[in-house]
Amino acid sequence: MPYISSFKTHLFTQHLLQGQVIAYPTEAVYGLGCDPLNGEAVTQLLTLKQRPMAKGLILIASSFDQLIPYLTLDDNDRIQQMLSTWPGPTTWVVPAQPWVPPWLRGEHSSLAVRVTNHPIAAALCKAFNGPIVSTSANISDKPAAKTPVAVKKQLGLSVPIFTGDLSKLQQVTPIYDLITGQQFR
């Protein structure tokens, strides 16, 4: 496992706690993240990306336990299938608890979630003590950023960037529906 600076992780966790949007490496591309329960931070992220709220967002976590409060889990067979893919680059769309804000769910009653195995992304979630929003660091409908320079080029200098290596995944992470098993991407 690569060395992750605890000082840098602490600094970026403070950005999250202060309601800021950050950029960080993930499995395949740089991601944008923020505190999922801070509506102003999520609105800032959506504005920066020029992404409609109706689409919903992904939450990443360092452990399944961090996601449980957000989810309605009933089907043990499918839950085991989901858990068998984590930690890893697979995202699952799972029924959300009724309290989960619409800025996370979008127009859906479900929530996209992933337990990441990317060392920096996982360290951020662990230090934050909960899941964070994860969406590609780019303006909607533009190519996803794979370097800090590409993040700055598309989104400007106002977003703090936690630099590091991607996990070398060649394609965006797959997304599956927990209830139907359907693959969305």
Image: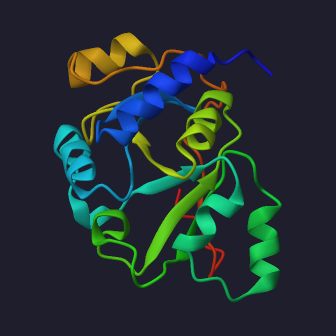
Q: Nearer the viewer, residue 91 or 172?
A: 91
Examine the image and state in which quarter residue 82 appears: bottom right
Q: Residue at x 57, y 32 (%)?
A: 28
The N terminus lies in quadrant: top right
Q: Is residue 27 visible?
A: no
Q: Nearer the viewer, residue 159 or 111?
A: 159
Can you give x and y, in whole percent of width and height, for residue 43 in the image? 20, 52
Q: State the residue at coordinates (45%, 23%).
A: 11
Taking the spot 39% from the left edge, 55% from the top edge, the residue there is 36
Position of 71 with respect to 103 (left or right) is: right
Q: Is residue 6 visible?
A: yes
Q: Number of callouts in the render?
A: 0
Q: Position of residue 121 (x, y in %)?
A: 58, 35
User: In the image, is residue 43 above or below residue 120?
Assistant: below
Q: Eyeballing the image, is 44 above or below 12?
A: below
Query: Residue 73, image x and y in percent?
Result: 65, 83
Residue positioned 58% across, 83% down in the render:
72
Depth check, front residue: 129 or 159:
129
Left or right: where does residue 106 sit relative to residue 144? left
